[in-house]
Image (cartoon, rainbow, N blue to C red):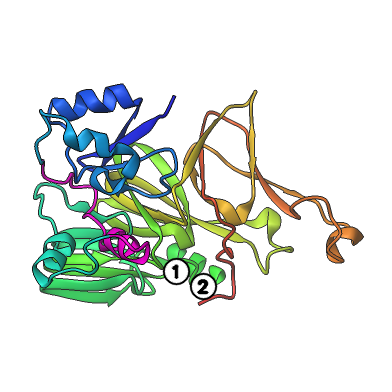
Amino acid sequence: MSEWFVAVNGQSQGPYDEAQLVAEWKARRVGQDTLVYGPGVAEWTPIGHIPTLQHLLTTPAAVHTPAPRAAAAPAAAAAATSAAGGQGVGHTLEEFLAQTAEKDNPGDVFELESSHMLEIHVNGRVWSKLGAMVAYRGQLKFVREGAFEHGLGHFMKKALTGEAAPLTKIEGQGICYLADEKKTVTILRLDGRESLCVNGNDLLAFEDGVTHEITMHRKIAGMLSGGLFSVRLSGHGMVAIVSHGRPLTLRCSAADPVTTDPNATVAWSGSLAPEFKTDISFRSFIGRGGGEAFQMRFAGDGFVVVQPYEEKPVVAGQS
């Protein structure tokens, strides 16, 4: 049975089988611009662009509904139709503007303009990854984090990590758009009772009410050019992380630990302290090993977020 996930107000809902999806359509809770993914669909795509769901569009009760705030309908879908030799090659200028224009849903500080772009409504100050800004409107200024901004201890950690997670302060009033190498953006909300550790390279932005602290994983220091570094986030506010493709969250416990590749590990519960395992041998050095040379083992109550991609880790010496 086919299972489909639906984006509603920036959140994934489902899975729905096709009968349930038809019921959602008839109830006018989804429309032809509603973003879904499921069998044969690798990215969030409007229902109207999925041939296997076209029968929904002929349902008598079907009425066009506005796209959910999760993302704008991608112009790439129309380009794919053109490449396949379909009818209606190209866009009129009016169609292009309608499909790619920014979508406004006031209320939250962080919103998904698309699955690869974060929209921030700035009224005061927020923090972002250095170099992530792609556009803005309003009265905003961008200031790189000062060396002693968070005290001497924080400065020493930054110095030892070789600027493992350089940040920018975005100050003023306006709207800012952030992206990072077309990675998928995920928005999380911390409520003050929990904390989150994020690979330094996978942290896109966070509100000013969220505190951050660099964590140095010294057990692997002699093997990865000084160590692997993450950022521990806690407090109240919204956090945006990025991943290559759709992330996968794995639950773990003391009785059922999870082991991951450090280069594919995006984030984990603040309650977890990863243990680094090594598999170094002569066969590993000549490329004949049977597995990953370094592994992260999570044993405790919490979760680990991984991506379908092995990324070069943020290590000391990079700046």
Where 144 sits versus 183, above or below? Answer: below
Where 51 sits versus 240, above or below? Answer: above
* Residue 140 position within the rendered picture, expressed as x and y whole percent measured from the top left: 14, 73
Dots 1, 2 in contact, CB < 8 A: yes
* Residue 139 position within the rendered picture, expressed as x and y whole percent measured from the top left: 9, 74
Mark 1–mark 2 Cα distance, whole angstroms, equals 6 Å
* Residue 19 position within the rendered picture, expressed as x and y whole percent measured from the top left: 30, 22
Q: Residue at x 28, y 71 (%)?
A: 133
Q: Quadrant of residue 64?
A: top left
Structural crowding at the residue carrying mark 1, measured as other residues with C-alpha within 10 Å and reported as few (<14), some (14–19) or many (≥20): some
Q: Secondary structure at mark 1?
A: helix
> What amino acid is labelled 1 in the image?
Phe
Q: Is residue 117 left or right of residue 171?
A: right
> What amino acid is labelled 2 in the image?
Ala
Q: Is residue 99 left or right of residue 18?
A: left
Name the one closer to the observer, 130 or 90: 90
**Is 259 in the magenta?**
no
Asked whether residue 57 is in view, the answer is yes
Q: Is residue 59 left or right of residue 272?
A: left
**Is 70 in the magenta?**
yes
Which label belongs to residue 285? none
Q: Secondary structure at mark 2?
A: helix
Which label belongs to residue 155? 1
Name the one closer to the observer, 188 or 55: 55
Q: Residue at x 32, y 44 (%)?
A: 51
Asked whether residue 30 is in view, the answer is no
For mark 2, what is the residue? 159
* Residue 264 position within the rendered picture, expressed as x and y whole percent measured from the top left: 57, 53
Q: Which residues are magenta?
A: 65-86
Q: Residue at x 13, y 25 (%)?
A: 27
